C-alpha cells in the first residue's frame, strides 16, 4: 500500500497546522476538510473541501481518491469521528489516524480516567471496523504531553510566575514530545504503512521527571522557582470531587486529570519506554532530544 493523498479533519487547529506543513513538505497531496462557514486560511498551499460532519454523503464525496485520513478534531468535533470513519470506509480510504495524540490510554489506570472515555470508545470502534473491513487500517499516536505546547499553556508548570507543583516527590518519569515534531510522526506512519498497521505508535522526544524539568527551568531562567508539593492520589480525589459537583468545571477537572496521567508515573504508563515492545521512534524517524535541545525549547518559550 502506498499513501499519496491525505485528508485532514480539524486542520485549522493547534495540531492541524504543523501536521499539514510536514505532510505537504514531504510530498503528500493534502486536502483539508473544512466546515461550512468556518473557512480558515492556511499558510501552506492545500486543497480545501467544505464538509458537513453530520452528512455521510458529504464526507464520502470529500474522501473520494483519498488514501489516508488524519483526524485532529477536538472538543465537540470529536463526536464527528464515527461518521468520518464510516465515510472513510465507504470511500475506500486505506489508513485512518484518529484524534488521539495524548496520554497512554493502553494502561488500565489511565484508561479509567473519565476525560479519556470518548477517545477510548473510538479506539474500540476503530479496531472493530478495521477487523470488519480489511481494506481499512489504522494507526494512533501516543506521545503523552506536547512539551512546547503544554509548557507554554501552563500544564507542566507556571512559566510566568516561576512556579511548579511537584507530585509524589517529583521523580516519576514521563515521556514528552514537541508539537513541532508531530508532523514527522504522522509522515513517518504514512510512509511506513506496513510497520504501523492497526496499532498504537508510541513516541518520545525526551524523558523527564518533574525534578529534572525544574532544574533545567531554573538553569535557563537563572532564577529559583517556587516549588509546591502535592500527591497524585490527592489530585485524583479532588478531580473526582469536582466531577461529582452539580456543575463540574472543565477548566479544573480537564487539566487536573491530565496531570494525573502525566505525573502519575509507571502506574499510569507515563514513561513510554516501559511500553512493550518499546518506542516507535525508529519506525517513524523521530530523533530524541538532548539536554541542549530541551534548553533551547524552554528558552524560546520563556523569552
Ligand atoms: N497531548 C497534548 O499535549 C495535546 C495538546 C493539545 C491537543 N491534543 C490532542 O490533539 C487533538 C487535536 O487538538 P487541537 O488542540 O489541535 O484541537 P483544537 O485546536 O481545539 O481544534 C481542532 C479543530 O477541530 C475542528 N472542529 C470540527 N468540528 C468542531 C466542533 N464541533 N467544535 C469545535 N471544533 C471542531 C476545528 O477545525 P475546523 O474549524 O477546521 O473544522 C478545530 O480547529 C485532540 O485529540 C487533543 O486532545 C493533545
Image (cartoon, rainbow, N blue to C red):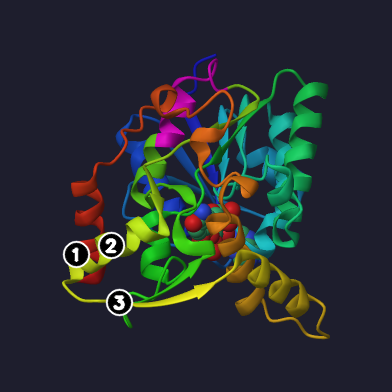
Q: Residue at x 37, y 36 (%)?
A: 184
Q: Are marks 2 and 3 in contact (CB under 8 Å)?
A: no
- Residue bearing the label numbered 3: 225
Tell me the quadrant of the picture where the C terminus can be found. Answer: bottom left
Could you say which quadrant of the image residue 140 lies in? top right
Could you say which quadrant of the image residue 290 lies in? top left
- Residue bearing the label numbered 2: 215
| Callout 3 crowding tier (Cα within 10 Å): few <14, some 14–19, many ≥20 | some
Residue 288 is at least partly visible in this image: yes
Q: Residue at x 68, y 67 (%)?
A: 236
Q: Secondary structure at mark 1?
A: helix
Q: Earlier in the sequence, mark 2 or mark 3?
A: 2
Q: Earlier in the sequence, mark 3 or mark 1?
A: 1
Horizontal and vertical percent position of residue 159: 33, 74
Horizontal and vertical percent position of residue 302: 24, 70
Taking depth in this image into account, of 121 and 82 the one nearest to the observer is: 121
Residue 36 is at least partly visible in this image: no
Q: Secondary structure at mark 3?
A: loop
- Residue bearing the label numbered 1: 219
Horizontal and vertical percent position of residue 92: 68, 25
For the residues labelled 3 and 1, the Cα–Cα distance comes to: 10 Å
Amino acid at each position: 500500500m502506498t499513501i499519496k493523498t491525505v485528508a485532514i479533519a480539524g486542520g485549522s487547529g493547534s495540531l492541524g497546522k504543523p501536521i499539514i506543513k510536514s505532510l505537504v513538505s514531504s510530498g503528500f497531496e493534502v486536502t483539508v476538510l473544512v466546515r461550512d462557514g468556518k473557512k480558515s486560511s492556511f499558510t501552506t498551499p492545500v486543497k480545501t473541501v467544505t464538509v458537513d460532519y453530520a452528512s455521510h454523503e458529504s464526507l464520502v464525496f470529500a474522501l473520494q481518491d483519498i488514501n489516508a485520513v488524519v483526524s485532529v478534531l477536538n472538543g465537540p468535533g470529536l463526536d464527528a469521528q464515527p461518521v468520518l470513519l464510516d465515510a472513510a470506509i465507504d470511500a475506500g480510504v486505506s489508513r485512518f489516524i484518529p484524534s488521539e495524540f495524548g496520554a497512554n490510554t493502553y494502561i488500565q489506570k489511565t484508561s479509567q480516567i473519565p476525560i479519556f472515555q470518548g477517545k477510548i470508545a473510538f479506539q474500540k470502534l476503530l479496531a472493530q471496523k478495521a477487523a470488519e473491513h480489511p481494506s481499512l487500517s489504522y494507526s494512533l499516536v501516543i506521545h503523552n504531553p506536547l512539551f512546547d505546547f503544554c509548557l507554554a499553556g501552563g500544564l507542566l508548570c507556571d512559566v510566568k510566575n516561576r512556579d511548579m507543583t511537584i507530585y509524589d516527590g517529583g521523580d516519576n518519569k514521563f515521556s514528552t514530545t514537541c508539537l513541532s515534531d508531530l508532523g514527522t510522526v504522522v509522515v513517518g506512519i504514512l510512509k511506513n504503512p506496513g510497520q504501523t498497521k492497526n496499532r498504537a505508535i508510541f513516541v518520545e522526544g525526551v524523558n523527564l521527571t518533574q525534578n529534572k524539568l525544574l532544574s533545567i527551568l531554573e538553569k535557563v531562567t537563572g532564577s529559583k522557582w517556587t516549588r509546591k508539593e502535592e500527591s497524585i492520589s490527592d489530585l485524583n480525589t479532588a478531580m473526582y470531587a469536582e466531577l461529582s459537583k452539580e456543575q463540574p468545571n472543565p477548566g479544573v477537572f480537564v487539566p487536573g486529570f491530565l496531570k494525573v496521567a502525566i505525573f502519575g508515573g509507571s502506574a499510569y504508563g507515563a514513561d513510554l519506554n516501559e511500553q512493550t515492545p518499546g518506542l516507535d521512534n525508529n519506525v517513524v524517524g523521530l530523533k530524541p532530544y538532548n539536554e541542549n535541545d530541551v534548553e533551547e525549547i524552554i528558552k524560546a518559550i520563556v523569552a
